[in-house]
Image (cartoon, rainbow, N blue to C red):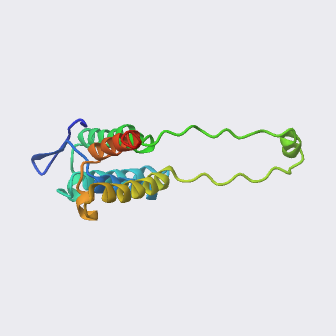
Amino acid sequence: MIPEIEITCRGGTVFINSVTVEQYKKYVSLMEKNGSDRVTDAMFFNRRIVQEIFGNRMSLAELGGAEVVEFLTAAKGIHFIMQNVISEKLLNIVEVEPVEQETSAFDEYDIENGYEEESEPEENTWKVCGEILDRVIKIAIRLLKNSYSQCMREDIVSLLDYLKFELDTINENQT
């Protein structure tokens, strides 16, 4: 269960208390596209995120007219839920041990003499989350025997908890 997030817009209060797979997928997509360090870009993406998560019940212009503190509180709440609750569950659905990279006796020599291979560019975290989410959706479709659109309407926290349970107990009934 996630905490309720609300925002007042157009004289009425709009709230959410659950996140669907589709909403999380849109959030991940927007976060992947937001690579800028400019404040104006961050505010635009925050308005788009709030708009998407609240089901497009308000326009960007209406969000621009909302109280700043209330808007930022809603955006911060959404980011907390998406990153600290859902992304954490998504990335920990399968427990894996981290792979340690072996060091070589020649590593220091290579660095000193410029022979060090260029490190691979770091992958965008949100791109990785999107790829994992796509795999989770495929597994959920097979496991639940739902259509893609039905899967997209599922509460993502409940779905991830169920998939974690299924993965943890996959070998219990086999003899």
Q: Is residue 70 left or right of residue 45?
A: left
Position of the N terminus by quadrant: top left
- Residue 44, can we see it? no
Q: Position of residue 173 (x, y in %)?
A: 36, 41
Horizontal and vertical percent for residue 85? 35, 38
Q: Is residue 175 left or right of residue 14?
A: right
Closer to us: 40 or 148: 148
Q: Nearer the viewer, residue 86 or 58?
A: 86
Residue at image coords 35%, 53%: 27
Vertical side of 138 occupied by 81: above or below:
above
Residue 99 % position (x, y) = 63, 40
Q: Depth check: 127 or 58 in front? A: 127
- Residue 33: tell me if it is visible: yes
Where is residue 152? Give x, y as percent. 27, 58
Q: At x 89% / y 42%, what residue is drawn?
A: 109
Q: Which quarter of the figure has residue 106?
A: top right
Q: Nearer the viewer, residue 14 or 60?
A: 14
The quarter of the picture where residue 67 lies is top left
State the image quarter where residue 174 is shown: top left
Task: Name the residue located 27 percent from the left edge and 43 percent from the top edge.
Answer: 158
Where 71 sits versus 40, above or below?
above
Point out the residue furthest to the front here.
Answer: 175
Tell me: 120 left or right of 89.
right
Residue drawn at point x = 83 percent, y = 42 percent: 107
* 42 on left or right of 117: left
Q: How many marks?
A: 0
Quadrant placement of the C terminus: top left
